[in-house]
Amino acid sequence: MDHRILITGSEGLVGGALRGSLKARGNEIVGLDLRGAGSEHGDVRDPGRVRGAMAGCRGVVHLAAVSRVAWAERAPDDCRSTNIGGLCRVLEAVFEQPARPWVLFASSREVYGQPRRLPTTEDAPFSPVNIYGRSKVEGERLVEAARVGGRRTATVRLSNVYGSALDHADRVVPAFARAAVEGNAIRIDGAECTFDFTHVDDTVRGMVAAIDRLESGETLPPIHLLTGTPTTLRELAAMAMTLTGKSVRVVEAPPRPFDVSRFHGDPSRARELLGWEPRVGLRNGFAQLVRDLRARPDAIECGSAAQ
């Protein structure tokens, strides 16, 4: 029991990689995901399932969410009930546990909306421009209230995590990589849109470092887990063609109205508090993804309920 950690959204890109890392450190992992098998199948909005999964756990990593901006725009009620209501169920279960488990919450760079200053620090004001971002702002507020209520908490803000051939096909990095591998056109919604792409291995290392601080009794301020390096979507498409050795048609479209147009963050707080720095550059991470896609062209998507 002393080594049990709950991961909600355990079947997603980050959840699956984090499970492997924590298990390698001797932890027993309890998963909860809509795509989970057997006892790990469940909806984070179901208080009974969350309570049962939390029993005996010394901490919880909360990743479960409607995790795509476009999905949230199409199904706003589902986004709110999952991203806010589901987190409420998790925090209620945390407060019911006599062992006072810690909470690590996965938030997003979407909380800033279109930042006034780049690179953006964790102290920048919240100004979300879409439903998903607003749900994460509310999530951070709920986690802060839990901290004030006496629980050890930490929030990590993630940015365009990539790195698996099993990722959602509509995420921009795997979408560009797969299109180039298969010789299909690459569609760019906003060629000059700029983002901070972070490899899943770096994301997981940062989360494990945050867990170590929580387990030592600390409570942390919000922390970026990102590279600090901006890349335009046009540059990403060119990289896809270079690394696959294919010249494919590029279809440029205007940016989507609910998307942030430019973001890169300052990772210095993670370095100072966690001793963390990104190790996987975008070119190397993208090249590995291309190799993985070529090795398994039939790859299916990660579960839909994870960040």
Image (cartoon, rainbow, N blue to C red):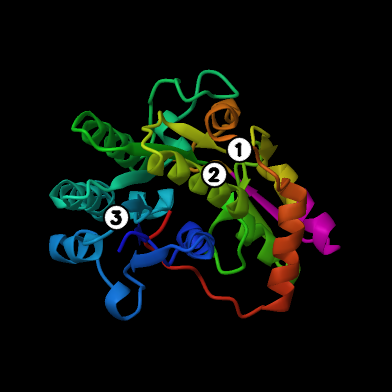
**Looking at the image, can residue 213 be seen?**
yes
- Residue 139 placed where, x, y %? 29, 40
Looking at the image, which residue is at 57% across and 30% down? 265
Looking at the image, which residue is at 40% across and 28% down? 221
Above or below, comparing residue 143 to residue 3 in the picture: above
Q: Which residue is mark 1?
A: 276
Observer-nearest of 38 and 23 = 23
Q: Is residue 305 left or right of residue 233?
A: left
Q: CA distance from mark 1 to mark 3?
A: 36 Å
**First in residue order: circle 1 vs circle 2:** 2
Q: Is residue 58 left or right of residue 268?
A: left
- Residue 172 placed where, x, y %? 59, 53
**First in residue order: circle 1 vs circle 3:** 3
Mark number, residue 206: 2
Above or below, comparing residue 66 to residue 216 in the picture: below
> What range is drawn magenta here?
238-253
Q: CA distance from mark 2 to mark 3?
A: 31 Å
Is 191 magenta? The answer is: no
Q: Quadrant of residue 241?
A: bottom right
